[in-house]
């Protein structure tokens, strides 16, 4: 049997375990309660609501896209819908004379009102969309008349913007690059001024359904002041509106963007006009070269002719094959004629000199022996035969006579002519003397006639085309 002391010890131990359990239970309860108690609402710890996670009405539901048939134009069956247009030209990229076209990058904006797109708004603010909504609503079907290529820019996304206002007004803007035809008149090239036009028109809707107009008149066309071209000076931009008629479909409103370009002449002066002028001047050098120097004069003439041919070929290679004469063609071909005539001039001089030498040889064969002549230079020339007054042969020098004894031979011919007996037999030799003077005079007169005629041509040419 357990004693009383043992029972007291067991009771004491049990009470200790109970106290310990109660302590741990209270500790756990405190921890739990501490975790459930919120932190103080200090401004630093307060989180703002995430507006992107809030429930919003879809744009299609707000604009009631599914409630209307957008394959039909606004106010179908009623008056034509007005569509205003304005354009901002970003750049003029290229002007091609060969292809007769130009390339332009522009912002094309359309303005119209579609009450089907009106929506409720407390602050009267518009909504802006990208190209995804454009495919679900009605937009004007504009196209560029006489365009060869065109595309809407799509980097980094389609460059299309749609802005809808609460009252149903719509702004539709897109960035386009278009290559269109430009009928150029090159009759004054390169001193010409060209006017090109970009034409905008609705493809399907006639003027009974769609009224196309410039939204602000001439102010509807804006250009970047930094636009420049290497060969042209942009003089002005302006707009017009006309009606275009198609026999099968009817009348259409057409908008025109006209721009006038004046070509820079300096490039063509350096590349075409100056080289051609220098070649003509170079051909005149042969007039100062002795006519017996065939290896010097012939290559000079041929070289200038070939160079002019190369210049003409190079210019025409970069031009369209038009059936009329251009201003540059007139200048180059006249220059070519001057160079060619300088070669013909030497051919004439050389031919006359050859004829003269033949007569010289015949005259020398018919002359009597002149062994008794002391100094032929002291002889006087008969003025009745030569046309000159009494003068010493030294005064004439080598004028019109060949070198290597030419003066001696001519003096011998003159001595024979002074003989009465020989003069009667050799009377035709008077023409021989005149031939020498004429062949020399051709070069002499060419030195004045060729430059004078070319200067006169330049005065007339530049006064007409400038």
Image (cartoon, rainbow, N blue to C red):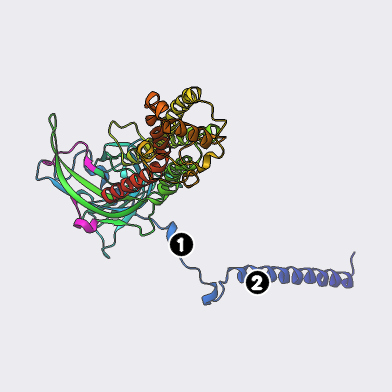
Q: Is residue 187 left or right of residue 293?
A: left
Neighbourhood count class around disc 2 (C-alpha, 10 Å): few under 14, some 14–19, many 20 upward: few
Percent of width and height locating residue 403: 54, 36
* Quadrant of the snapshot with the N terminus: bottom right
Q: Secondary structure at mark 2?
A: helix
The numbered dot on residue 175 is none
Task: Return the residue nearer the eye: 185 or 46.
Answer: 185
- Identify which residue is drawn at 49% across, 25% down: 367
Percent of width and height locating residue 136: 29, 42
Task: Return the residue nearer the eye: 411 or 424.
Answer: 424
Range covered by the magenta-colored residues: 200-220
Q: Is residue 13 left or right of residue 191?
A: right
Percent of width and height locating residue 339: 41, 37
The numbered dot on residue 30 is 2
Q: Secondary structure at mark 1?
A: loop
Regarding residue 74, the answer to whether it shows in the image is: yes
Q: Which residue is mark 1?
A: 50
> Splitting the image into 4 quarters, where does residue 320 fall?
top left
Q: Specify which label sits upstream in the sequence, 1 or 2.
A: 2
Task: Return the residue nearer the eye: 336 or 437.
Answer: 437
Q: How many marks?
A: 2
Q: Where 202 falls versus 18 (above or below)? A: above
> Splitting the image into 4 quarters, where does residue 252 fall?
top left
Regarding residue 84, the answer to whether it shows in the image is: no
């Amino acid at each position: 049997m357990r004693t009383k002391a043992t029972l007291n010890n067991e009771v004491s131990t049990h009470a200790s375990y109970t106290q310990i359990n109660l302590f741990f239970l209270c500790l756990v309860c405190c921890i739990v309660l501490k975790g459930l108690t919120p932190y103080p609402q200090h401004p630093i710890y307060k989180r703002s609501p995430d507006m992107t996670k809030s429930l919003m009405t879809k744009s299609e539901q707000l604009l009631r896209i599914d409630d209307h048939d957008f394959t039909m134009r606004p106010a179908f069956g009623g008056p034509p819908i007005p569509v205003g247009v304005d354009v901002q030209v970003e750049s003029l990229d290229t002007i091609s004379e060969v292809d007769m076209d130009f390339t332009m990058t522009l912002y094309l904006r359309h303005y119209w009102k579609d009450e089907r797109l009106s929506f409720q708004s407390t602050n009267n603010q518009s909504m802006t969309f990208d190209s995804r909504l454009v495919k679900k609503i009605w937009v004007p079907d504009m196209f560029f008349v006489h365009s060869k290529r065109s595309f809407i820019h799509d980097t980094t996304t389609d460059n299309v913007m749609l802005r809808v206002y609460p009252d149903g007004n719509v702004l539709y803007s897109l960035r386009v690059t278009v290559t269109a035809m430009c009928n150029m008149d090159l009759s004054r090239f390169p001193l010409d001024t060209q006017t090109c036009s970009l034409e905008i028109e609705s493809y399907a809707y006639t003027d009974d359904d769609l009224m196309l107009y410039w939204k602000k008149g001439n102010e509807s066309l804006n250009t970047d002041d930094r636009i420049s071209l290497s060969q042209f000076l942009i003089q002005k931009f302006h707009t017009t509106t006309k009606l275009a008629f198609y026999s099968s479909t009817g009348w259409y409103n057409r908008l025109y963007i006209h721009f006038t370009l004046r070509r820079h002449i300096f490039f063509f002066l350096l590349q075409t006009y100056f080289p051609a002028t220098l070649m003509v001047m170079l051909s005149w050098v042969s007039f100062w070269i002795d006519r017996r120097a065939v290896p010097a004069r012939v290559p000079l003439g041929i070289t200038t002719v070939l160079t002019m041919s190369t210049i003409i070929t190079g210019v025409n290679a970069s031009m369209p094959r038009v059936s009329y004469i251009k201003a540059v063609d007139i200048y180059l071909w006249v220059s070519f004629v001057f160079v060619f005539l300088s070669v013909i001039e030497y051919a004439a001089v050389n031919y006359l000199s050859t004829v003269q030498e033949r007569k010289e040889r015949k005259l020398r064969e018919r002359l009597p022996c002149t062994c008794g002549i002391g100094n032929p230079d002291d002889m006087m020339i008969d003025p009745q035969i030569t046309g000159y007054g009494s003068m010493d042969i030294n005064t004439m020098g080598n004028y019109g006579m060949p070198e290597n004894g030419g003066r001696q031979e001519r003096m011998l011919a003159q001595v024979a002519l002074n003989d009465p007996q020989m003069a009667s037999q050799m009377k035709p030799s008077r023409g021989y003397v005149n031939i020498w003077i004429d062949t020399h005079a051709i070069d002499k007169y060419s030195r004045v006639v060729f430059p004078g005629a070319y200067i006169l041509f330049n005065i007339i040419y530049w006064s007409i085309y400038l």
